[in-house]
Image (cartoon, helix red, strand yellow):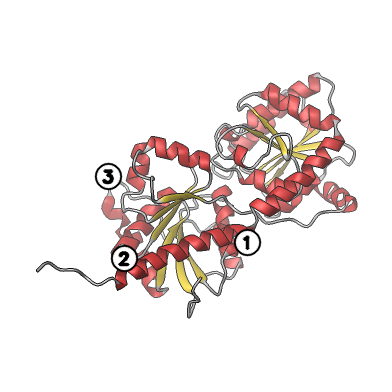
Amino acid sequence: MTAQASPRSVLYVAWAPFFSGAERAMLLTLRSLDPARYVPHVLVGTDGEFATQVRDMGISCEIVSTRPVDRRRPLASLGALASTLRAALHHRAALIHSNEVPSFQIGGYIARVLGIPAVTHVRFPDTEAGYRWFLRPGFTRALFVSNGLRNEAVTAAPGLFDSSSDVLHDGVEMQPEWTPEQVGFARADLGLPHNRVIVAMAGQVAEVKGIWDFVEAARILATRGAEPFFAVLGDDLKTGGQIRRAMQEKVAALGLADRFAFLGFRRDAPRVVQAFDMVAVPSHVEPLGNATLEAMAAGRPVIGSRVGGIPEMIVDGETGMLIPPASPVDLADAIGALVRDSGTRGRMARAARHRAETAFSIPAHGARLQAHYDQLLQTRLAASARPEVTGA
């Protein structure tokens, strides 16, 4: 790569209506940048947990409405467009990168006005109409978090993503391996039993994550006489905990309250995962699944649904187990098998950690992302240096 005289400025735009996997992934993206090459500046639509953590990293963060343009009231977005333009000019942005498709309209229009590359992450599936509306300003590069999601999008919106898209799996922070004593201290601190095999769900508490399958699997295992303990690490931040409370009520109604712990949202969730023996990701839809990556980075086997990007992370039978989605019986069978076989759990845990470190580390993610930036900016530089050809 040709050395550059000074780092280039990247303006990141994020909607972030609440803190979930997309926001956690962007924090890791910001950490992955080489400060000698790229300096981030962040515009975020909500002054919440995500903005707080960005500021804690020492990165400039401005609160600007990044909501998608309202078709019925397009002029309502003029203020957001003006604020984004001012920020891009102030920071002399070399490119604009939107963290998700809905926030791309604001950043995309400003990139178009300034003639700089417009990058968007695609983290969630959408319809053809949705993709074409949100991406209307025109993007230079679309980065999908998994091959599964890209294939779905290419089918949903023919011709939109063909040559201008690529796959960039999220990165994950590797966790120092805990000693048995540290695991014991963590369990005591969390109020978890010391002498039980613990299986956890981690991340956003939402129906699409398969929470009811998790509860039903616990009920099935109880009828079989199995004794695992179940933990839920995370919360339903989107609705202020309504779904999590409904989950707790269901667990109590089934007589399983003494087998469950609801630990809530924790900033140290990627580290706390080591207090568990395994993690379940029974999602019905999952473009990638940061809970899977974080469990692997913590050296824990994962039981995940065979949907979306999950099979791109879990090697079935090696780093964890893949099961059909929406199948509590299969989930219960997989949990039961690992509860009974500590040797397989240990082997999968080591393999999961190794795969996370070699395939999904933050340095690897950052290198791939910055290679995209380099290529886009070099292409723009070459185009601007090309002499104009006029007719005779």
The kind of residue on which mark 3 rests is Arg
Left or right of residue 248, residue 131 in this image: left
Local secondary structure at mark 2: loop
Point out residue 121 in the picture as x, y percentages from the top left corner. 47, 52
- Near-viewer residue (168 or 327): 168
Instruction: Report if residue 381 is visible in the image.
Output: yes
Residue drawn at the location 85% of the way across and 21% of the way down: 225
Which residue is identified by label 1?
A: 363
Classify residue 108 by image quadrant: bottom left
Point out residue 388 in the picture as x, y percentages from the top left corner. 21, 70
Q: In the rendered image of this protein, does residue 293 appear above or below residue 370?
A: above
Point out residue 152 in the picture as x, y percentages from the top left corner. 45, 36
Instruction: Report if residue 52 is visible in the image.
Output: no
How many angstroms separate mark 2 from mark 1 (CA)? 30 Å
The kind of residue on which mark 2 rests is Gly
In this rendering, the label closer to the viewer, 1 or 3: 1
Which residue is identified by label 2?
A: 115
Which residue is identified by label 3?
A: 72
Residue drawn at the location 36% of the way across and 70% of the way down: 381
Other residues around mark 2 within 10 Å, as few (<14) / some (14–19) / many (≥20): few
The kind of residue on which mark 1 rests is Pro
Left or right of residue 89, residue 229 in this image: right
Q: Earlier in the sequence, mark 2 or mark 1?
A: 2
Other residues around mark 3 within 10 Å, as few (<14) / some (14–19) / many (≥20): few
Q: Earlier in the sequence, mark 1 or mark 3?
A: 3
Residue drawn at the location 64% of the way across and 37% of the way down: 244
